[in-house]
Amino acid sequence: MKTNILIIGAGISGVSIAYNLAKKGMTGIHVVDQGYFTNGATGRCGAGVRTQWATEMNCILALKSIEFFENAKQILEYPHDLEFKQEGYLILATSEQEHLQFSNNVKLQNSLGIPSRQLTKAEALKIVPHLNPEAFYSATFCQKDGHLNPFKMTEAYFLAAKKLGVTFSFFEKVTNIITKNNQIQSVITDKNTYETHQVVNAAGGYSREIGLLAGVDIPVYAENHEILATEPVEKIQGPMVMSFSKNIYCQQVPHGAFLMGRSDPNVEKNHSTESTWQFLDQMAKTVVDIMPLIGELRVVRQWGGSYNMSPDRQPILGATKDLPGFYMACGFSGHGFMFAPMTGILLAEVILNETPSIDMVPLSIDRFQTFNHENVEKSVV
Amino acid sequence: MNKKDIIICRCEDVNLEQIHNLLEQGYTTFEDLKRLLRVGMGPCQANTCGHLIQREIATFLGKPVHEIPVHKVRPLVMGVELKRIAGVKDED
């Protein structure tokens, strides 16, 4: 089968890229995915979207993406509810040192047009009254941040892309990428062979493996991050509550359930998405410390999903000198869902040889040749 | 009986018509339906709807039921309060 471009991965990044390419008039776009709809990181994410970051690039990608989410239902003509709410992220500083670091973050965010602000403990307690006042020092808040349903958002892009002629196949696994004289010739899957000179690697947790099939060494790896969901209750919490030092994010989704996650600093680098009792134990203790009231809720289910980690916790977007026609949208380090609108716009611009909307040099894979450890994103869980 | 009146998932209040609509749109695995309709995400964790939906998928695809995978089983088997897991002692 001949295609103009083959996109590997039908998660939020893949469908956003496909939609943006098709909207710009490209034809012959096919997307393959090894599993069912949103089987990968997109369908396993914490459903949060935020602009409060510590690096300039993450701030820019996030702000522009949220501006898209604000109008996504109309732009994509999606018939269902995207469950988008902008009730903010309340990020807790738990020490004076973290408070000072957050002052710098807010300064950076404000300089880029993000309306975040630092709050005293009393102000934070007005927004989330059930916070344990002993558990934190101060907070930052940005009203623009919030929640979006990952399944619905992905379906919105998916349906819009299909309407524009993009084709999809699920349960189809890429097994090889054939190159000749430094040009892509074809992509082989367990079901088909696609003759194509252009490939997008939007394979989430499997981005490294896809890169290696094409002979491109991408410095990313997968690690399991776990989440749990509680029974649904009446609305008691507007914003996502997050703390990097306590290692927690926790929000009540519109459906009523609370979702919460934390990371395991000793987690192995692999594709596991299993559930562990250690996570359940640590998660319960952490949330009961910060918000004792949430302890009354029953855990219904826990699950896991892959973060695709990059060395500086910022995405790798664009082309590579190593193999013309091979494009990457990976290394999101747990934030591919919330950056997806910009991922789609930027990749479409690069692929169609247009001038990108923002300077993409800081997002290029080449940045790791002279890796600067000063610019690692620290505002992550 | 009207398909709207046949409840398939009691936890999330999903009826047979919604299941059939999505099957016709091409969402033909339990995992697809779970993500778009929340079936199997409630307190019973698909103990009720799991085999009902498996049968609907099998009929729709014209396949035997045993060829239709059920969803991935996740902990917990039944709801437990977070404070019990955290080891908080009751005050009363």
Image (cartoon, rainbow, N blue to C red):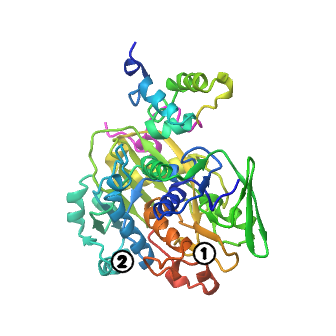
Q: Amino acid at mark 2?
A: Asn
Q: Residue furthest top?
A: B1
Inspect the image, locate mark 1, and give the three-letter code of the amino acid beneath it.
Answer: Ala
Local crowd size for mark 2, using a 10 Å CA cut-off: few (<14), some (14–19), many (≥20)? many
Q: Evaluate whether residue A39 shows in this view.
A: yes
**Secondary structure at numbered mark 2:** helix
What residue is drawn where x is 57% and y is 27%? B57
Task: Tell me if residue B9 can be seen.
Answer: no
Image location (x, y in percent) of residue A329: 56, 67
Figure quadrant of residue A11: bottom right
Percent position (x, y) of residue A289? Answer: 38, 54
Q: Is residue A270 depicted above or below A326 in this figure?
A: above
Depth check, front residue: A209 or A20: A20
Residue A240, numbered label? none
Magenta region's main secondary structure?
Answer: loop
What residue is pinned by disc 1?
A319
Q: Quadrant of the C terminus of chain B?
A: top left
In front: B50, or A104?
Answer: B50
Asked which secondary structure carries label 1, the reply is strand
Q: Chain of mark 2?
A: A
What segment carries the magenta color? B72-92
Give the residue number, with chain letter if any, for mark 2.
A105
Label 1 crowding class (10 Å Cα cut-off): few <14, some 14-19, many 20+?
many
* Mark 2 or 1, closer to the camera: 1
Quadrant into which the N terminus of chain B falls: top left
Residue B80 colored magenta?
yes
Residue A112 placement, left or right of B82: left
A10 versus A371 height, above or below? above
Q: Nearer the viewer, residue A164 or A98?
A: A164
- Relative placement, left or right, of A139 versus A160 is left
Residue at 47% over, 79% down: A355
